[in-house]
Image: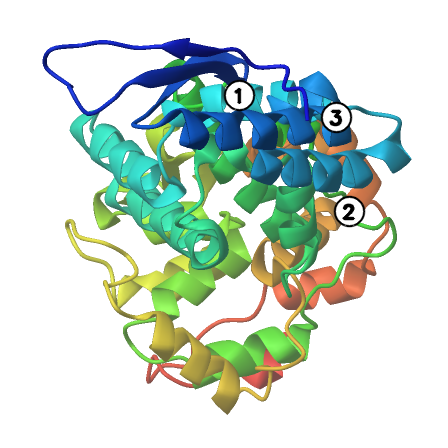
Amino acid sequence: MRTQFKIRSYADSNRPLLKFVVNFKDDGKRARRFFGTKKEAETFAQQKTIETINQGTEGAEFPTELRVLAKKADAIVAPFGKTILDAAEFFAAHLRRVTGSRSFSDVAAEVLATRKADGASADYLRDIRLKFDAFARTFGERMVADITAKEVHDWLRGLSVGAVSRYTTRSRLGTLFSFARRQGYAERNPIEDVERAKERSGEIGILTVAQTARLLESASAETLPYWSIGAFAGLRSAELERLDWAEVDLEAGLIEVKAAKAKTGSRRLIPISDNLREWLMAHAKASGPVLPIGARKKLEADRDRAGMRENWPQNALRHSFGSYRLPVIGDTARLALEMGNSPSIVFRHYRELVRPKDAAAFWKIAPARDGKVVSISRAA
């Protein structure tokens, strides 16, 4: 059989046993094989010739293993109208993105450390840590550059929480991914493509006069200021948790929500109603948190005793305040200032929500002389 590969004599004093050489191509690159006898060289040349005839010159120079992988890859991308070159370029771009990235857990720790160094409040740090930890249980080891908007969207929709809680969680995650983008850990923020959760329209949930009285009657001495300020001053939950007694001025009759503690970032003053003053008189302090650290379980216990653990409306205290306050003052702009909302939101959510006689009864809920039991007769 005539071979297509030339056999040449070879002489090298350092390799005296090798007498012949065959030049060929291996994986597209020039290669040589040395032999001690001409017979061995001819046999090898014939094998390479057969490979060339069976597979063609291009096939002979293409490794069998790589050829098999290429066929499998082509079968995968062909239904999408793509080539294996398209796939390789796409994957190379992905690798470039994640090479300089970091895991979600690592970035979360960095964000927390940065916010703490910047002087963020303990409540804010606790809140973002809880949100980050929840997300990290699923995505902790993933590179932030590799997390998609759809994955975040699906994860948020899988949470057993209301629209407001989903919105807050989305916002906290957005803070982290924005930080990652600025640090060069990701090219973009996937949260920008995740739709914001919206509360369903319709009537908001509030506590009845009797439920409010029962809740205050069931409260412990530690938690009573929290419940009473929430019901009769309408602070948001986060604002209540950050409130200090130094910001509750019974003499002036005002509660100050500092700009740093307000959701809107704007300071506001809320008048202390006559019945709220009665609730706070026996508990007020010069300073210190209104809600002691670690009192969350006691709040749940209060609701259990009041029989409202399961049927608790979202933002119950704040919505109750707005609903019962508007019929008394009849001024949406004034109520908006007290609640830190826009007049349009106050008008949309609280207009004609409760009857005037129920509103009057709500603002008569006050403690009996023993300071513990709600005077139900005054709230009837």
Residue nearest the viewer, comparing 58 with 263:
58
Q: Which mark is residue 225?
A: none
User: What is the spatial separation of the Cα atoms under label 2 and label 1, in whole angstroms?
Assistant: 77 Å
Please indicate, yes or no, whether residue 266 appears anywhere in the rendered image. no
Q: Residues within 10 Å of mark 1 (few under 14, many from 20)?
A: some
**Figure colour scheme:** rainbow
Residue 121 x/y as whole percent: 26, 38
Looking at the rendered structure, the kind of residue marked 1 is: Asp
Q: Is residue 334 above or below residue 127?
A: above
Q: Which mark is residue 27?
A: 1
Marks 2 and 3, the one that precedes in the sequence = 3
- In the rendered view of the protein, which quadrant contains the C terminus? bottom right
Task: Name the residue rendered at 67%, 78% in the picture.
Answer: 311
Q: Is residue 136 above or below residue 68?
A: below
Q: Which amino acid type is shown beneath numbered disc 3?
A: Ile
Q: Amino acid at mark 2?
A: Tyr
Is 231 drawn above or below residue 211 in the view shown?
A: above
User: In terms of sequence position, does the residue under pointer 3 or pointer 1 come before the other?
Assistant: 1
The residue indicated by pointer 3 is 53
Which residue is at the front of the view, 28 or 367? 28
